[in-house]
Image (tube, helix red, strand yellow):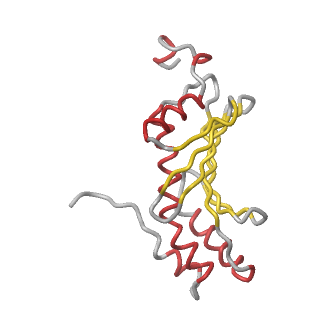
Amino acid sequence: MAQTDHFIASDEIHPIDIVEAVATHHEWDFDRLADNQIAMAVEGQWRSYSLTLAWSPGDEVLRLICTFEMDPPEGRLPAIYETINLANDQVWDGGFTFWVPQRLMVWRYGLVLAGDAIALPEQVDQMIGNALTACERFYPSFQLAGWGDTTPAAALDIALGAAYGRA
């Protein structure tokens, strides 16, 4: 049993309420679409990102979808797909996919909260931060693969890696 079980009844804390608190803290524009769903817009360096988080009580999963528009030429879709596969090999906490009909690049992640687990604000903040970091990191690679005259492997070489240490 988690220590917080002694202080907070799990049915009193809704995961989307926690997401809303995080969005308010960061001053992000958001809209509570339903009791179990929230959408927000976050400005990045490369794009504006649309995030939707939804609570699925049956699965006990808080789902995050972060999207940005991308409309590569049809002939470059195989290169986009290969770049997505290469990018997904470099991340552990989610993954990219491309929704062709909507022309959207998508980052997906699910936080499992089985057994009445409670999402902490720090977890939700980290989950959203990781999504934005991945999108910002790989956006230039997807652009090069879609519109540049380069291979997916070469396009991925420009992905910004995580910095370690300090200057």
Q: Say which residue appears at 69% left-offset and 81% top-offset.
A: 76
Percent position of residue 110, x then y: 63, 43
Q: Say which residue appears at 55% left-offset and 26% top-offset.
A: 118
Quick check: 155 left or right of 99? left
Quick check: 95 left or right of 75? left
Q: Is residue 18 above or below residue 96?
A: above
Percent position of residue 31, x then y: 61, 39
Numbered circles on residues, count:
0
Quick check: 56 left or right of 110? right
State the quadrant of the C terminus: bottom left
Percent position of residue 165, x then y: 27, 57
Q: What residue occupies the far bottom of the structure in this picture?
A: 149
Q: What residue occupies the far right of the structure in this picture?
A: 101
Q: Is residue 96 above or below residue 149?
A: above
Quick check: 78 left or right of 156? right
Q: Say which residue appears at 60% left-offset and 31% top-offset.
A: 16
Percent position of residue 122, x then y: 44, 35
Residue 35, located in which quarter of the rendered image?
top right
Please tell me which residue lies in front, 56 or 31.
31
Q: Say which residue appears at 51% left-offset and 14% top-offset.
A: 8
Q: What residue occupies the far top of the structure in this picture?
A: 6
Please tell me which residue lies in front, 135 or 51.
51
Residue 82, located in which quarter of the rendered image?
bottom right
Residue 83, located in which quarter of the rendered image?
bottom right
Please tell me which residue lies in front, 67 or 41.
41
